[in-house]
Image (cartoon, coloured by chain):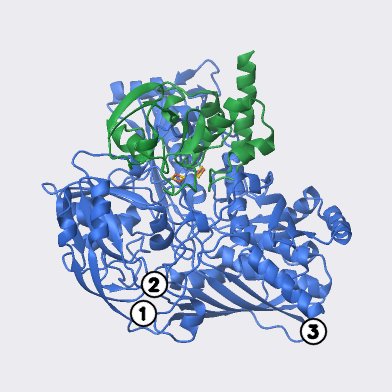
Chain colours: A blue, B green
Amino acid sequence: MKTVGVTRPIHDAAGKASGNTKYAADVMLPNMAHVCLVHSAIPHGYVRAVHAETALAVPGVLGVFHCFNTTQRKYNRYRSRFSQELPLEERAFADYVRFVGDRVAAVAAVSREAAERAARLVEVEYEELPYAVGFDDALEGKNCLQGQSPTIKEFAAEFGTPPEGGCVDVESFTQFPPIHHATMEPHACVADYDPYQDQLVIYSPNQSVHGIRVVLADYLQMPYHKVRVVKATMGGSFGAKQEWFTEPVAALIAKQLCRPVKLVYSRAEAMTCAVVRGAVRASVHGKYAPNGTLRSLDVDLVLDAGAYVGNACDYIASIYGKLFRCYRMEHVRYRARVISSNTPVSGAYRGWSAPEAALFTERNLDAAAAKLGMDRIDLRLKNTLMPEDIDRKSSLPVEDIRIHEALLRGRELFFWDRLCEEDAVFNASNNRYRRGIGVACGGHGNTYYPRHGDFGEGRAFLNEDGTVQLVLTVHDHGCGTVTAMKMIAAEVLDMPDGDIYLGEGDTAVTPVDFGCFASRTTFVLGRTIHDSALALRDTILDRASELFDLPRQDLYVENAAVRSKSEPGVCISYREVAQTTMLKRRRNITAAAQFANVTNPGVTGAHFTHVEVDTWTGFTRVLDYLAVHDIGQPINPGMCIAQIQGAAQMGCGAALREELVVGKDGRCTASLSKYHLFLAPDLPNIRVELLTEGRSQEGPFGAKSIGEVSFVPSAPAVCSAVNDALGSELGVLPFTPDRILTYLAKEKEESL
Amino acid sequence: MIVSFYVNDRLVQLETPPERRLLDLLREDLHLTGVKEGCGEGECGACTVLLNGEPIHACLTLAIQLEGCHITTIEGLSAPGELDILQNAFAEELAIQCGFCTTGMILSAKALLLKQPDPDETMIREALSGNICRCSGYVQIVKAVKRAARELREAAV
Ligand code: FES
Ligand code: FES
């Protein structure tokens, strides 16, 4: 292959390096109003009055919007397709507030400063209600949401039959706290409304332009063609920009004011009022054969949805499905509950339920290895899915899955066995630092299928000069989707990817699509563009055959030209084919393709970590990190590696530092000074190994997904290493210095 | 107040409240939107610009502090349509994903290279310790700075 598999920078790298690329917050339109939100100051209650007079008197203020002067209609932030039946939960401005940070009002003004100043002057009167923060409050039955029990939903499922006797029992407990996506770009959006055409335009960094259209059009009672949503350059998402809360507010105000408006979140708003990865705790009872085979996993799980249910009911069901993506499961019993609390709203986060599944599964496997006296890699090798196995939940083949190989390769490249010995020597020779190594595996999907039907549509046009334009609904998160799609088409058409144009999602231009999540982009949309390019290639060959009177079966493409097997002298450039077709046939050369996948192969990775814990300070340093991924054919390998390294960074954060703490007063961490992310000096040179032999059947050139699966094993692998270093069984994340010191103090007390 | 200072070697005079942030002067008054706001509290580094060659947070610098100062923003590194050696190294070494941290990251790296033409990996990581990148594991960023340092040294001889 000439293009696929050859690393190159993303399409807008130069624009971003120069500062020229515009993000939503950079957009300035004539007559644009700036919007600043007012948030609930209480965790739970009713808004009884909004006093806006002082705010309205601030020069430049155009309006103050709140529950008493805007529509009472509601929408669901998680909805992204027309067919989803979800309760309508949320008003643009709440009359019934559910958490500190709920939207109560908004001020629009001619300048950002005026909007901010006026927003501080809006006075809200509340009737306060009792509230609940976190698991314990809700599980004790404390009131969270009016008219609902704290337990919103229960889900139970069982696969296989429980083993009879002869098993070793292993109990474990894990807990993920709420965490912040920490996209460097806080949420932002621009909305514009033309009352004469009844046309709304939304410009926002988002993962689904059509998802927003469905929600906004229904919410504002507009026909779909009157709502145009354009995907803006995205300063990171990781799931944070796939649920809708800025767009409905901006749209409502733009419509009311009949002028463009811009809404940009502050960091505090992005942390507390947008979306968080919800807290999940799981008690697991594993049963293992004495040789390490996992015979049964019994899971009891609770997810804290926060103040709006959003995706939580689907999420707990999805965790069950993810259990079958990496290991052979003989028997699984799964019970899960969604609880609500008066805390920030849970939602999508990179990996969508797989990281939770991996955390509790991997912890149980580690505990089993300890109990059975086995090496942690050996125990996993006994249980991984193997090529040609079936995903027992979906009944689909996992195809050429390579998780077994990933473990073996990682063991070798990480010098696992040698590190075991070296750490033992190191730990015996000093009484302050303790070193340990960790391993974890994780699996994910490549598409919604079979949970939902999935499909894509792409179009391709040949220009008069022989360059190509593609149309596909993609949403580049920054990881290079646009470039990858162009590379796929370039490979099919045998032309430079620099001669291909592809824009991003725009509901006025690109076909209806479910959005860039569920790791479906490369697998489903990549194959769609592959097929579109193939159709274009066929059309080019058909036209060349007719117009130049050449036998069709002899023709092929090479270097952006049509060649003939039988007549080596024939070389008709794409440009010539295009121009001749236009002049002689009065036609364009265009093609379209739709693709609906029927597979969802296994896609997995194994991560290996080496850490050093300072037992005096409780601080953990990551000394080495290796990620081995079973990726099939990488389209742009360098960018796959870059994404995986980013996932490793996030996993280190999730394991060791990151936690949104909600206080007893319902207030949540609202500053990066209190939410610690991994910085350049904190990380080793993260190593990545791609296993490319396990090709998918349906993905473009055998590609599989990478964006989400790369995050799945990362936090569990770091936790595994810390537990190895300390000989502990810690499961409550993050392993902060405080938690580690508390553990060490307890251990010391017990040993006395 | 009226403040006079230099932005990318050009003298600018702006009428502004003294407590207005440099970030807003650049983005809103001068339309230099290459500088980004990621936190507004000095934590993320997305707003990094150079003040007399030193990296500073434009979100924490006020108009009143600027009189006579020289500010360099990302737009000042290269002519329109071009990239300087450091910017180019970031683009080519895959050090850019979502790009929201990029301009601040490049300016922190620039400040390092102005002082230390041959930094080792630890120095580079330290110099970037005020710039958060959520998309990467910093590996390509470090590589890009190393490459730029090498190319700049080569260009100097
Ligand atoms: S915006 Fe200034 S440091 Fe984050
Ligand atoms: S490239 Fe996205 S934050 Fe650095």
**Depth check, front residue: B104 or B41:** B41
Q: Which of pointers 2 and 3 lies earlier in the amino acid sequence?
A: 3
What amino acid does circle 3 point to? Gly
Q: Which of pointers 1 and 2 lies earlier in the amino acid sequence?
A: 1
Q: Are marks 1 and 2 on the same chain?
A: yes
**What is the x, y in percent for residue A150?**
42, 82
Res. A307 mark: 2
Q: Chain of mark 2?
A: A
Near mark 2 (Cα within 10 A), the count class, few <14, some 14-19 or many ≥20, is many
**Depth check, front residue: B139 or A273:** A273
Q: Are marks 1 and 3 on the same chain?
A: yes
What amino acid does circle 1 point to? Leu
Res. B49 mark: none
Marks 2/3 in contact by CB < 8 Å: the verdict is no
* Res A218 → quadrant: bottom left
Res. A145 mark: 1
Residue position marked by numbered label 3 in the rendering: A166
Q: Chain of mark 3?
A: A
